[in-house]
């Protein structure tokens, strides 16, 4: 039911002249716990809706409105009713035919960045077709709109920049951030993805050009998790860059100064977080993305008690990796507690994964966290993290400093620790050498090797290297996609430990339950839900993750488990609790199918 209705007098201008109409504009309401803002959201796919902007969109304006534009899919009736005659060629196309044509065109491009730019152009002119294309061809297009191609897009963002997407908040806006948020045309924001661009994937400081990351993540929130595009807000906090190449680039789009740090940085972030809560309320989800290690941990620790915040690099990566480990037990045998873990990389991702594994071990064995951490070892740039180094370690590394003699390199650490699981989160490519993989294979019948660093160029090893050097015995997954590998007449299909398995469903679960805080138990619930989606046919191929082709169903199941945990912990505000949370999640999801216009 519509909560409130108001009649507005609208003036519609078209080539047919000026006419006055009385129209019904439905105001914000609630549907299935997820806020809806207009008649289009409330209508079923079969119902007629009115293409509202400020007034009824028509004629040339309608064709330039990405939310309502359908291109050649406008019917004969719609072309008459909305003054489109002569503005379109006479042919009519279904959305399915448009999709077929676009996929044909995309496949003609040999350079991935060209495909990325074509997809971004489509998003800016026809929103529904963009998401229909992405949902129906997710396995093919995910590497285009996100990693690995988005990394190159961020590096060249200044050169390929055409039209601003999202909000840019720089030091120039200090003291005015609330006003800047109000400049954004949408009022009902449910998810914000924010970066300061200091650690983009494994590419380092890209400054203001890191905007490609929030834009890409939020397109996946919609395509994979079903959040409305209008409920998503990408934000880049620009405090400068220490990248000399960008500072000297005449096409650089950000502040030309070195990064602000310390109090100046903290004050800007505090103003941003305060303004977000004031403008959008308690239940808006703020996802921190690609902040440098020191800021990422500090921001998560500072704002977790007061805001609904989530760091995908720390928590999302951890959740997807834990899911892979839980699923892999079906292939390697034993319980999680029977395994020993060695990490290369002790930053956000490495320590985040390690902590979630320790939490799951504690949950399963009832052992204290301090005890379960001892099964997990980390190697950083100075070697194995051990007790004798404790005084010089950053605070987030100290829990992983165990009693052991110093060990310098990764190969020596593998030989000393004898891990069953090797996880790379270093951001440095080619570090899982032939000797390292062979050592893992000599210790284990089925070594579990996860090369998680992005993009592909920064992966610790390739799928082909892992399978070849282990003589086909490795269970392998990576952060970026790799093609199937043939070894000894057997085809191995590498899995992808992609955060996109987790964060869209995780976010949907938080939003549909009205969660006010994120709890570690929600991350464990998401991991267990994802692991449960891996079927025997996937295991038979050596996969430890399900296919992305079923991602919306996967996201609905993850959302249901996350929401259930929110209700169990008393952190949910949407009451009463729905009886069937999976069906509820599916009912909340945005559909990109074209609507018929009055």
Image (cartoon, rainbow, N blue to C red):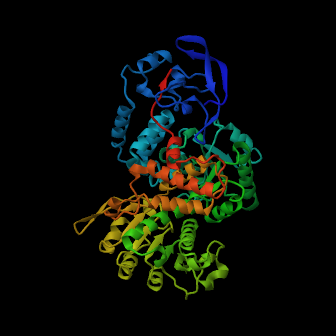
Q: Residue at x 42, y 63 (%)?
A: 478
Residue 210 is left or right of residue 541, and the answer is right
Residue 267 is left or right of residue 28, and the answer is right
Residue 137 x %, y %: 38, 45
Residue 296 x %, y %: 63, 62
Q: Is residue 429 visible?
A: no
Along the line of sight, the residue nearer the viewer: 236 or 526? 526
Image: 187 above or below 359 = above
Residue 473 is left or right of residue 408, and the answer is left
Image: 86 above or below 115 = above
Q: Quadrant of residue 473?
A: bottom left
Along the line of sight, the residue nearer the viewer: 4 or 242? 4
* Residue furthest to the front: 579
Residue 19 x %, y %: 59, 11
Along the line of sight, the residue nearer the viewer: 423 or 469? 423
Q: Residue at x 50, y 57 (%)?
A: 499
Q: Residue at x 44, y 81 (%)?
A: 411
Residue 147 x %, y %: 46, 54
Number of callouts: 0
Residue 253 is left or right of residue 224, and the answer is right
Q: Is residue 582 visible?
A: yes
* Residue furthest to the left: 489
* Residue furthest to the bottom: 405
Along the line of sight, the residue nearer the viewer: 251 or 176? 176
**Placement of the N terminus among the 4 image quadrants:** top right
């Amino acid at each position: 039911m519509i909560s409130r209705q108001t009649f507005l007098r609208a003036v519609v201008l078209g080539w047919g002249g000026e006419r006055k109409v009385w129209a019904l504009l439905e105001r914000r309401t609630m549907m299935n716990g997820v806020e809806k803002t207009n008649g289009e959201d409330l209508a079923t796919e079969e119902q007629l809706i009115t293409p509202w902007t400020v007034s009824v969109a028509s004629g040339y304006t309608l064709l330039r409105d990405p939310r309502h534009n359908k291109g050649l899919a406008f019917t004969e009736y719609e072309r008459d009713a909305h003054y489109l005659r002569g503005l379109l060629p006479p042919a009519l196309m279904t959305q399915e035919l448009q999709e077929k044509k676009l996929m044909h065109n995309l496949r003609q491009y040999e350079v991935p960045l060209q495909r990325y730019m074509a997809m971004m152009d489509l998003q800016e002119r026809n929103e529904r077709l963009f998401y229909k294309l992405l949902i129906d061809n997710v396995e093919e297009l995910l590497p285009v709109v996100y990693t690995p191609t988005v990394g190159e897009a961020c590096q060249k963002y200044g050169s390929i920049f055409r039209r601003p997407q999202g909000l840019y908040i720089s030091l120039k806006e200090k003291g005015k951030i609330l006003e800047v948020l109000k400049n954004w045309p949408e009022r009902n924001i449910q998810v914000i993805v924010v970066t300061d661009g200091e650690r983009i994937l494994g590419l380092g400081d890209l400054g203001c050009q890191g905007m490609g990351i929030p834009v890409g993540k939020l397109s996946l929130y919609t395509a994979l998790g079903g959040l409305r595009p209008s409920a998503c807000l990408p934000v880049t906090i620009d405090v400068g860059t220490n990248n000399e190449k960008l500072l000297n680039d005449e096409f650089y789009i950000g502040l030309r100064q070195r990064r602000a740090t310390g109090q100046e940085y903290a004050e800007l972030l505090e103003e941003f977080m305060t303004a977000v809560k004031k403008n959008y309320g308690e239940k808006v989800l703020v996802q921190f993305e690609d902040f440098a290690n020191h800021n990422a941990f500090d921001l998560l620790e500072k704002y977790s008690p007061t805001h609904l915040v989530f760091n995908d690099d720390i928590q999302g990566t951890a959740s997807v990796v834990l899911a892979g480990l839980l699923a892999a037990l079906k292939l390697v045998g034993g319980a999680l507690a029977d395994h020993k873990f060695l990490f290369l990389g002790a930053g956000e991702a490495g320590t985040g994964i390690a902590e979630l594994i320790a939490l799951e071990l504690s949950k399963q064995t009832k052992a204290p966290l301090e005890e379960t951490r001892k099964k997990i070892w980390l190697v950083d740039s100075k070697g194995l993290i051990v007790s004798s180094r404790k005084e010089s370690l950053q605070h987030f590394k100290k829990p992983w400093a165990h009693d052991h003699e110093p060990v310098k390199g990764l190969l020596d650490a593998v030989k000393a620790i004898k891990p069953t699981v090797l996880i790379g989160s270093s951001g440095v490519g080619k570090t899982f050498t032939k000797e390292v993989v062979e050592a893992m294979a000599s210790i284990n019948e089925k070594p579990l090797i996860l090369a998680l660093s992005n993009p592909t160029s920064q992966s610790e090893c390739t799928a082909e290297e892992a399978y070849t050097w282990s003589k086909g015995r490795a269970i392998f997954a990576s952060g970026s996609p790799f093609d199937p590998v043939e070894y000894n007449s057997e085809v191995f299909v590498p899995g992808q430990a992609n955060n996109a398995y987790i964060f869209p469903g995780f976010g949907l679960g938080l939003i549909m339950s009205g969660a006010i805080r994120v709890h570690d138990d929600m991350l464990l619930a998401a991991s267990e839900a994802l692991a449960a989606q891996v079927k025997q046919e996937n295991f038979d191929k050596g996969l430890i993750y399900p296919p992305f082709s079923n991602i919306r169903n996967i996201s609905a199941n993850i959302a249901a488990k996350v929401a259930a945990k929110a209700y169990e912990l008393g952190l949910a505000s949407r009451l009463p609790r729905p009886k069937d949370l999976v069906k509820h999640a599916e009912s909340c999801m945005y559909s990109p199918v074209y609507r018929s216009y009055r």
